Image: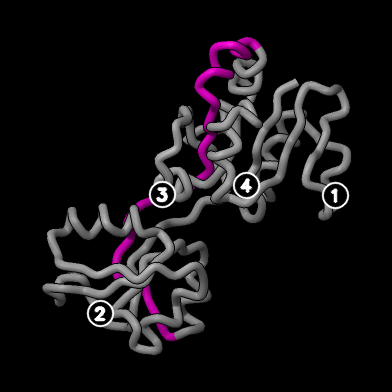
Amino acid sequence: MIRIALAKGRVSDSVLEILKGKGIEFGDEKDDRKLILHEPEGKYELILVKPQDTPTYVEQGVAECGIVGRDIVMEQDSDVYQLFSLEAAKCKLCLAGKPGGRLERYSNIKIATKYTSSAEAFLEQKGVGFELIKLNGSVELAPILGMSDAIIDIVETGNTLRANGLEIWEDICEIQCVFIANKAALKTRHKELSELISCLYEGKV
């Protein structure tokens, strides 16, 4: 049996549909309270975990593999193999702020974000001075209340930005699901993992 760690939320909703399309179904997936789902033939077990915890479950060997948003992998320095991307839960990491603003207008900018590692890499590449404010939610409030000049956050439809009087200044990178694997399991469970990888790899981007 192969155990798959799956990030809950937008990722799990999309990935469950992909798995279903590949003939891999979990009979108890409709029960929102369940955190462990079983494939009837006993080949796969799915554990639903917080996105930020997904790489940890895989790195620690609790799960042989996992599927999580690329934004999480970018933020964490987990010791796992990132094998391929999936055409699922697509969005983008963006710099956003009040209408009319642009990064080029700042010699030093204050950014609110929960993606501090990705933000730091982006801003260093741009060669601008910066200060990062770590927030875990509702980052849109920061520029509205004058806490920051702008934000760096995941944008899917842009509706939340527009509803709060903000706009995208710049797209930083595309985000989608990625398939990750435990390094030891890729050797010791190669045959079983290869079957799953071959099944999903057709959906890569």
Horizontal side, residue 152 vs residue 9: left or right: left
Mark 1 Cα within 10 Å, few/some/many (few <14, many 20+)?
few
Q: Is residue 163 above or below residue 10?
A: below
**Amino acid on which disc 4 is placed:** Ala
Work out how far the residue at label 3 is from the one at label 2, CA to CA, in angstroms.
26 Å
Q: Earlier in the sequence, mark 1 or mark 4?
A: 4
Work out how far the residue at label 2 is from the one at label 1, CA to CA, in angstroms.
44 Å
Q: Which mark is residue 75?
A: 3
| Magenta stretch, residue numbers | 165-191
Q: Is residue 125 above or below residue 98?
A: above
Task: Reply yes or no: does residue 175 show up in magenta.
Answer: yes
As helix, strand or loop, the secondary structure at mark 3 comes to helix
As helix, strand or loop, the secondary structure at mark 4 comes to strand
Task: Reply yes or no: does residue 188 show up in magenta.
Answer: yes
Tell me where residue 113 sits by quadrant: bottom left
Q: Which mark is residue 7?
A: 4
Q: Earlier in the sequence, mark 4 or mark 3?
A: 4
Image marks 1 and 4: residues in contact by CB distance under 8 Å: no
**Amino acid on which disc 2 is placed:** Gly
- Image quadrant where one finds the N terminus: top right
Q: Earlier in the sequence, mark 2 or mark 4?
A: 4
Q: Which residue is mark 1?
A: 30
Tell me where residue 94 sits by quadrant: bottom left
| Image position, residue 112 (x, y; %) | 36, 72
Mark 4 Cα within 10 Å, few/some/many (few <14, many 20+)?
many
Work out how far the residue at label 4 is from the one at label 3, CA to CA, in angstroms.
15 Å
| Image position, residue 160 (x, y; %) | 52, 76
**Amino acid on which disc 3 is placed:** Glu
